[in-house]
């Protein structure tokens, strides 16, 4: 048993070294936002529960898993159809933005080591972008509030492409904005659908540990090229 554990640790360390080497020769680094750059996934279950409660509905146990990778608009469509809501899509999204605004502004922290890692990439002259399934309003709010907006040349949202994750659309569009070859991009992601999207775009992908997707840790490890618990591991 001890030998198996040591072998797994060695494999993890080898993959981290591969990631570090890849970062030395990359054109651009693209980050997912929620659960990857910022610790924010924890708020959405409570928002979904509160939102559905306003309509006299209970939170289904499978809801969060069903929403994985969907864009903000795709999620609104899903809610409208599954729960037969009378609100328009824009009304649903406006409500979610309003419910999450203060938490994103004041309560959502950066993941451990993010700022330090962004500083390293900036010093190396590596271009950076964000590819998020969240709304632009919340994405811009949280990176400004956390003082990291100046690192990113582009923010692409899932609402701006034909299909959300696991489609590669959002990552291909972000790479194009950064004038980077997809094969020369490194992506950081926290959920399997996002990892698949980046892999399908032909990119090197590092999975990031997040409490909200802890039960998917092995799946993330198997899908990605590397896996980190926090950004300090690659400084």
Image (cartoon, rainbow, N blue to C red):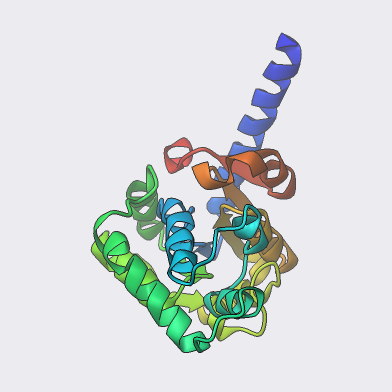
* Residue drawn at x 43%, y 69% as measured from the top left: 54
Find residue 233 and report its horizontal and vertical position in percent.
47, 36
* Residue drawn at x 72%, y 44% as measured from the top left: 219
* Residue drawn at x 59%, y 57% as measured from the top left: 64
**In the shown orientation, is residue 233 left or right of residue 161?**
left
Identity of the residue furthest to the top in this view: 2
* Residue drawn at x 67%, y 25% as measured from the top left: 10
Find residue 41 and report its horizontal and vertical position in percent.
47, 54
Quadrant position of residue 215:
top right
**Is the C terminus in the top left, top right, bottom left or bottom right quadrant?**
top left
Compare residues 206 and 67 and report the one nearer the observer.
67
Compare residues 180 and 89 and report the one nearer the observer.
89
Examine the rendering and report whether any part of residue 52 can be seen.
Answer: yes
**In the shown orientation, is residue 196 left or right of residue 140?**
right
Q: Is residue 198 above or below residue 207?
A: below
**In the shown orientation, is residue 156 left or right of residue 98?**
right
Quadrant position of residue 161:
bottom right
Find residue 160 and report its horizontal and vertical position in percent.
55, 85
Compare residues 169 and 133 and report the one nearer the observer.
133
Find residue 31 and report its horizontal and vertical position in percent.
50, 61
Q: Is residue 51 above or below residue 159?
A: above
Q: Is residue 69 above or below residue 172?
A: above
Examine the rendering and report whether any part of residue 148 can be seen.
Answer: no
């Amino acid at each position: 048993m001890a030998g198996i554990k040591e072998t797994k640790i060695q494999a993890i360390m080898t993959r981290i070294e591969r990631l570090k080497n890849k970062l030395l020769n990359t054109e651009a680094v693209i980050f997912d936002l929620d659960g990857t750059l910022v610790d924010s996934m924890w708020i959405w279950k409570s928002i979904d529960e509160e939102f559905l409660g306003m309509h006299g509905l209970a939170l289904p146990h499978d809801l969060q898993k069903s929403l994985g990778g969907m864009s903000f608009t795709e999620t609104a469509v899903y809610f409208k159809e599954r729960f037969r809501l009378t609100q328009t899509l824009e009304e649903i999204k406006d409500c979610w933005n309003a419910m999450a605004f203060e938490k994103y502004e004041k309560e959502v922290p950066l993941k451990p080591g993010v700022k330090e890692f962004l500083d390293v990439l900036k010093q190396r002259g590596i271009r950076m972008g964000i590819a998020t399934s969240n709304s632009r309003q919340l994405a811009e709010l949280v990176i400004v509030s956390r003082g990291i907006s100046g690192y990113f040349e582009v923010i692409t949202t899932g609402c701006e492409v034909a299909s959300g994750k696991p489609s590669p659309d959002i990552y291909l569009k972000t790479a194009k904005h950064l004038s980077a070859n997809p094969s020369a991009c490194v992506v950081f992601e926290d959920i399997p659908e996002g990892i698949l999207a980046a892999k399908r775009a032909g990119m090197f992908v590092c999975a990031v540990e997040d409490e909200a997707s802890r039960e998917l840790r092995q799946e993330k490890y198997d899908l990605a090229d590397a896996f980190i618990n926090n950004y300090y591991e690659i400084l």
